[in-house]
Amino acid sequence: MAKRNVGIVGDGATDRLVFLKLATIILSGGINQVELRRQNIRDAIDRYWKDASTKNEYFFPSKPAITLRNSIIRVLTGAFADFQGEIGAFSNQDILLLNTDSERHLQMPDDYFKEWAFCVQKIITAGIEMFYHLKAREGYPCEYLPLILSISAFPSTEILIAAAKGINTIYGKKAGELKQVLYGTTDLSTLRDEEFEEKALKYITPENINSIFKKIPESRILIQSLSIGKMG
């Protein structure tokens, strides 16, 4: 069976590794990973928080929401081109995964559904829908476009690892605090590959993905969408 191409956009190397492992486990292998290192939405998310919180305007038709959506479209355009350059022609079996750290923490899981938090993922989804609209206008048929999935974790990708490890006190912590709890450092570049495997990646298992799904609301659409594409 041919390998499924999975292109990953993330804030950094460790984030890409986490989502590669997550996709590999859910899809039961058969993955050709493509790291799209030139693209990320880190600056766009930071700018959105600054502008939206100043004006208390988080969703459309506010300028911060429109600006973030347009940034998503630009990043997807670049990622699409880089991904296509690596693999050649797309099929709708390929996956382009866009992830970023929100850098905002929640006090409890239900806080994800408050407008200020919930809007971020909806704006990203709007950017994806507009990107598909543009590609359709360019003449791309659906079977030659990848499935685009996204997640913005609160406060960061570490929340998924904490859930997988069964840590109960994962909410109410900033990104740096979570990193310290999980890795004993806030600078992940100091971790050797084998340390990151031991402290993070090895906990992403089929059983622990259920724990992530249960505890982390923002993970659920991504996990369910990947599950549809399970091979074998």
Image (cartoon, helix red, strand yellow):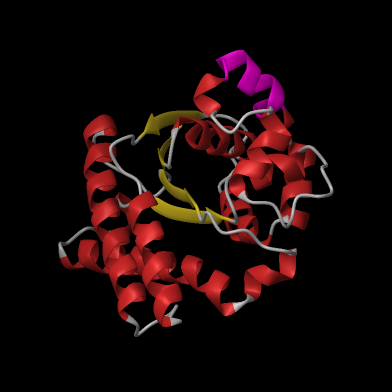
Using the rendered image of the protein, determine whether residue 181 is visible from the camera's viewpoint: yes
Q: How many callouts does the rendering have?
A: 0
Q: Quadrant of residue 44?
A: bottom left
List x then y, in percent, for residue 136. Answer: 23, 65
Depth order, front residue of 6/232: 6
Q: Where residue 214 sits in the image (x, y, percent)? A: 77, 56
Residue found farthest to the left: 138
Q: Which quadrant, please, contains the C terminus?
A: top right
**Span shown in magenta:** 191-202
Q: Quadrant of residue 218?
A: bottom right
130 versus 225 height, above or below: below
Q: Residue at x 23, y 47 (%)?
A: 78
Looking at the magenta stretch, what is its main secondary structure? helix
Q: Where does the image place residue 159, in percent across and percent down from the top left?
A: 67, 47
Is residue 215 one of those drawn in magenta?
no
* 113 to 102, vertically: above or below: below
The residue lying at 80 percent from left, 39 percent from top is 207
Residue that extends furthest to the bottom in the rendered view of this protein: 61
Kindly tell me whether residue 1 is visible in this rendering: no
Residue at the image position 28 percent from the left and 37 percent from the top: 38
Residue 164 image offset from top left, x and y in percent = 75, 40
Q: Residue at x 42, y 70 (%)?
A: 123
Q: In this rendering, would 11 be left or right of 142?
A: right
Front one among 183 and 142: 183
